[in-house]
Amino acid sequence: MRAVEYTRADTLDAAVALLQGDSSAAPLGGGTTLVDLMKCGVAHPSRLIDLTQMPGHDDVEAGESVLRIGALCRMSDVAEHPEVRRRWPAVSEALLRGASQQLRNMATIGGNLMQRTRCGYFRDPSFTECNKRDPGSGCAAMDGENRGHAVLGTSGSCIATNPGDLAVALTAFDAAVHILGPDGHRVLSIDEFFPLPGETPEREHPLGHAELITAVEVPVSAAAAHSCYLKVRDRVSYEFAAASAAVGLEVLADGTIADARVALGGVATKPWREPGVEAALIGRPASAAVFREAAALAAADAHPRRHNAYKVELARRTVERALLTVSG
Ligand code: SF4
């Protein structure tokens, strides 16, 4: 058994200082990912810095131009917030479909963005080949069981799928991630927050060891207000996406699409925006034929492996169905 020290931080500044002073410490939110990884033998922090007992950072503010979600908000509180449901329904739906009620009651928004891949080889240390867990060791998934792995954004080092749902909705609607660290406050676009694996798949985000997410902001838009999150999976609940789509449309009174947002989940190494699909929608009539034509452009640069080619067609059909749902 490993001993783990537990410390409560009273403020974010104190948490940053504690992390800065201990390279083997890890921040603890709801613990729904980190404790799981500790049990698997993948994460080995010697000290947990509990963030959840500090006051503040758990507010949802739905303003005139932006939705601001504190990093310590619980998934369930954001999903059920009446303004989020009304003005950013895809965000609410992504949270509802992202975990069971029990997990939603515990997991924080910051922790949700930091969750790690469900690649079975990564989560089982008895497999020695995993560049994400042990850089330079290889990738057992390349020629192994890769039915759930990514077809977009892959590299020769890693094909692990990003498991997020919320992150897909945030990507569709141009969210920003606010961060506090030893050098102060900075803001990253959601796209910057999730780098491609390239040759360094162990780096899943650009945060330094002592940096913490403080809040997420999502701009107000007509497309976000007319949006949905569709998640397709092997079973109805408690499962990660085989493919998912966050879609938003702004449709004018004459039926013309003025704005379109499309992002994919479950098929890529990061939440995957689809600008080609969006361009094929904007300026055209909101019709089933246009939706089908545009959705066929999704996952255009896919590189399937032996077991996951089905994801290409599934992603396109998911986008098409989401467009029909949100327009209907
Ligand atoms: Fe590891 Fe990535 Fe390969 Fe999975 S896909 S075994 S996480 S390197």
Image (cartoon, rainbow, N blue to C red):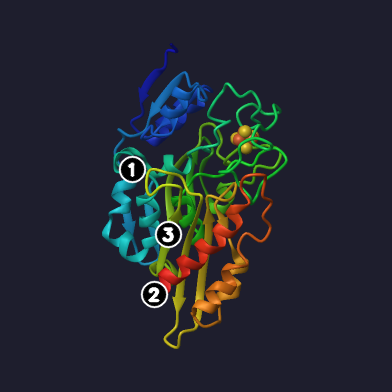
The residue pinned by badge 1 equals 100
Give SS at disc 1: loop
The circle on residue 77 is none
Residue 67 pos. (x, y %):
38, 59
- Estimate the spatial distance between the alpha carbons at disc 1 and disc 2, rounded to whole Å: 28 Å
Contact flag, marks 1 and 2 (Cβ < 8 Å): no
Mark toward the start of the polypeptide (2 vs 3): 3
Q: Is residue 202 visible?
A: no
| Dot 1 or dot 2, earlier in sequence | 1
Say which residue label 2 marks: 328
Which quadrant of the figure shows ligand 1? top right
Q: Quadrant of the C terminus?
A: bottom left
Residue kind at label 1, given as amino acid type: Ser
**Dot 3 corresponds to which residue?**
229
Question: Counting residues from the N terminus, which is met first, the one under dot 3 or under dot 1?
Answer: 1
Q: 10 Å neighbourhood of mark 1: few (<14), some, or many (≥20)?
A: some
Q: CA distance from mark 2 to mark 3?
A: 14 Å
Q: Quadrant of residue 214?
A: top left
Q: Residue at x 48, y 47 (%)?
A: 164
At 37% from the left and 41% from the top, the residue drawn is 108
Q: Secondary structure at mark 3?
A: strand
Disc 3/disc 1 C-alpha distance (Å): 16 Å
Q: Amino acid at mark 2?
A: Gly
Which residue shows up at 68% across the image and 58% down it? 301
The quadrant of the picture occupied by the N terminus is top left
In the image, is residue 141 above or below residue 84? above
- Count residues near mark 2 (Cα–Cα under 10 Å), then give few for <14, some for 14-19, many for 20+: few
Label 1 CB less than 8 angstroms from ligand 1: no
